[in-house]
Amino acid sequence: MPSYDERAFTERIEAARKHIRTVLDHTRNPQRAADVPHRYDDKFLLAEFVTRTAVAAVVQALEAIGLTAAQAAELRAWAKTRAVTLRLIAHEDCRFLREERRKVESSEYVSEVKGTFGSSTRSEKIITTIVEYRWAFEFEYELVAFPGTATDRALVVAARKGQVELTTTTDQPPRPRTVVRPPIDVNLTWLFAHQDAEGRAAFAIDRTAPTCHTPRRNAEIDEAVAAAGEVATWCAAVAEYFRGHLFTAQPEHGLDLAAIDDREVFVPVLPLFEDGGADGVLPLAYLHAFLAEAQRTLTAKRRALDAAFPRDASVITAVEAGLLVALLHARRVCGQLVDSVDHLEALLRQQLVAAIGKELTPADFTAYMDFHHRKLVAPAFRPLPFSYAIRRPDHDPEGVVAIEAGRAGASEPISTTVRRIAAARPMSFGLDAATRVTFLGERYLHAWVSHQFSGQAPAALQLVARARQFSSFVLLVGRISSADTFEPRLGLIVQNKDLVKLPLLLEQLPTPKEFRDAIESLSPEQQRFAKAFRGMQLESTLFAVCVIQIKPQLEKLLRLPPDSLTKEIRLTQELLDLFIEYQLPSDLLSYDGPADLPAADKLERVKQYVARMYEMIERSKARELEQEREREALRLAQLDRSPPPMPFGGPPAMPGGAPEGATRGRGSRPAPPPPGMPGMAGPVAMPVSVGYSMSAPPPAPPPPSAAPAPVAVAAPAPVAPPPARRQPGDSAPADPSAAAAAGDREPADYTRLPAELDRRFESLDTDGALRATILNPGEPWTRTAQPGLLSAPTTATLSAADRERERHRAFDLLDALTRSGSLAIDDASLHVILAATHCFDRTLVDTVIADNVNPIEKVERSLMIVGATIHGRPVDELVAPEHHARFFATSPGLAPAPALPDGATSPAPPTAT
């Protein structure tokens, strides 16, 4: 059936209102539902009214076809226990009658013939013999009703047989000799089951049933709409048989077939309210008046057709015309019923838009949920934006790391339920098969509960990292694979106003109920395989981001006191250049003097080591250039050519930097210091093969300081540095026992949380709408960098090769900062993110209107299920006290157990283990 057209339906209702003014009393003025104040329950009454009217109107149409009162009573009796079927049976025969020959004379032609003796006239006439074949086309059709499959008990509602003679000029029959048409059936069980013993329409909506959502969305109306659709389809099929097949057997009928229409027949199904009525809807008396008018106009139309069509044994007679009009009327009644109940749903949409003042979008709902969660959740557990400054206590931030979602053309941090955890034990990650790095620091457990309506694209997430000028940090992205293991998949050094954006893709897993239903009929082996694979998928939801601060780790590596490099911007840049570009071992740069020297002296010693390394590198570069010049001169001499004179000022710069392969990849050992200069105390004796880039030469080394004096021959053996001093308020103490006491208790194993959440979803999410969601890095990655202080920022897309190169650079730096894993990282922050998506089967408006569901209550319940698991607290602690009554009234499954007498025990409330 065609979809609901608001404009066309409104036009039909207005035309019907004009018509009923001639039917009803002048004091009555039925109005459209939108124009009459009414209650929500009145819409249920109106749905019942139009359905009862449609039932009665369709039965009237069947009576016009030929259904008698006795037959209708028997059909009602059958409908109580059996299915009632109405069937069209048609049979056609075409048999040869005779051959006829006749002669047809043409007009007489007179021609004048001229000869020697004068002219004369001659008359000519052509006689044609025509052979015609006469055929008898016989047809018979019946409309019968029977219970179940008992066709032997069929009741004949209408039947006719007839014959027409057809003529052809060939001996081939104009129609197939015998045709038995496939039966055309319609199930009328619902129609006659909704009539009482007296034949009156009896229909009501059970508003207490769980399937009853709105006046349009309930089991009773759904059955009525389905039954109306079947009747309308059957009527169209029967009409097509008559118009498209049977009537074509009588081509020269000379009748006005366009007169067979139901436009003049009144359709009594009208969703109108009584203006000023006590109950809003139309009184029952209107039902009888409307049905009587429909009966009158249908009878009048059939009489008009009786006068225009013959009543003989031919194919097209008044019988077929009346039958078609009745079927067309029944079809319109069924369509009007569907449009009427759809109109009630459209009216709800219009009222919702009028109440809010705009068409709601998923973005509006997302913005409201952020606002709502700030009020619903207790302050201690309130969701927070995922945007974190990378900083040490009492220091300015080095940068920011955030997860943002696109909203209305802008990007805003997502809100997550956060559990801040003090590291109770170290975790580690691998740089390669032989090197593992241990780290402590701040740890955050996040839970992000998103929602998605039907037809809505998943949220466009991106991981964003920003660094300030003269600041740097290492960003690692990966997953948690065990209780103490982080697996970085991606790595990046972010520094000097870099802005890096990594798209995040969402992969939703089946709900626990969907998974259980899917494996229910599998074999035990297949179930074990599916469960094992789902376990891996659930653990894949542990998305993790680790941020490692470089300056504190540099100070620890070089055995410098805390904050020594805070104001040493140039020295920090030079150190990073030596570690990243030249990959020098940290022993060549670490402080190795007495531990009791002042911090300034220690820093000065490191500066000297850095200056000497740059001096050595410059000498190595100069020697390589000199060697290259000598090789070029030798080559030219061999060619008997004089080398060109060198310009004053030294050898020319080599474009493009060092030859390919000069830069050593991570994992290879750096060139050892020249013999005779242990500890870098003596002069440089031989060049060191290093990789470098000539496009950005390092700054000139600083002038040597007078104190402290360099060691003449060899540096003393390194003295073990004192334990690193922590500033008050540091959030990542190195002592595990102190860490456990500093903040919230850390989960025993992060990898157990996804399975625990899955169990909570299955037991507490009664709608089966929460889906565990995997976050995966997507493409493309972009980096906005500013090469110089006066340069304009440029944005570049990182290819796969670029991303792999950046990962190696980050791992090379971490290898140097940790002495290949022997030095733990204290200043790190680990963010573990668990994502879940509440999926709705319909659009936002359809969820509210068609399902009669408040999505706010559904999403807030999902948030509390996840939040209670993450925080390990009962739900009543997470909900703000002023919202307890309302929240637990709509989500009773999350309510705390009632108090029991002393000594009694009760099940634990919904919380995490």
Image (tube, rainbow, N blue to C red):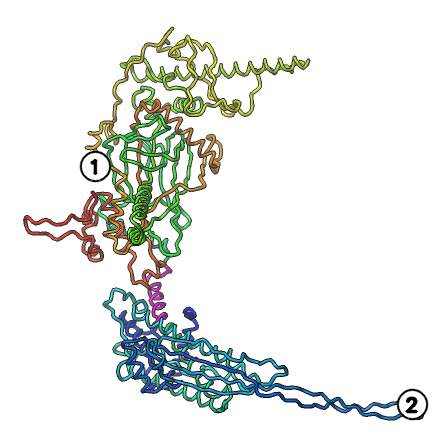
Farthest residue toward the right?
116
The residue segment tinted magenta is 341-359
What residue sits right under mark 1 in the picture? Answer: 745
Q: Amino acid at mark 1?
A: Arg
- Tell me the chief SS of the magenta region: helix
Q: Secondary structure at mark 2?
A: strand
Asked whether residue 50 is in view, the answer is: no
Question: Alpha-carbon neighbours of circle 2 within 10 Å: few (<14), some, or many (≥20)?
Answer: few
**Where residue 410 is drawn, which disc sits there?**
none
How many numbered tags mark residues here?
Answer: 2
Question: Could you tell whether 881 is left or right of 641 in the image?
Answer: left
Above or below, 452 relative to 427: below
- Gap between marks 2 and 1 measured at Cα: 136 Å
What residue sits right under mark 2 in the picture? Answer: 115
Asked whether residue 55 is in view, the answer is: yes
Q: Secondary structure at mark 1?
A: loop
Looking at the rendered image, the disc whose residue lies closer to the viewer, 2 or 1, is 2
Which quadrant of the structure image shows residue 72? bottom left
Nearest to the observer: residue 51 or residue 411: 51
User: Within the magenta stretch, is there residue 230?
Assistant: no
Residue 617 picture location, percent across and down? 47, 17
Above or below, 97 relative to 35: below
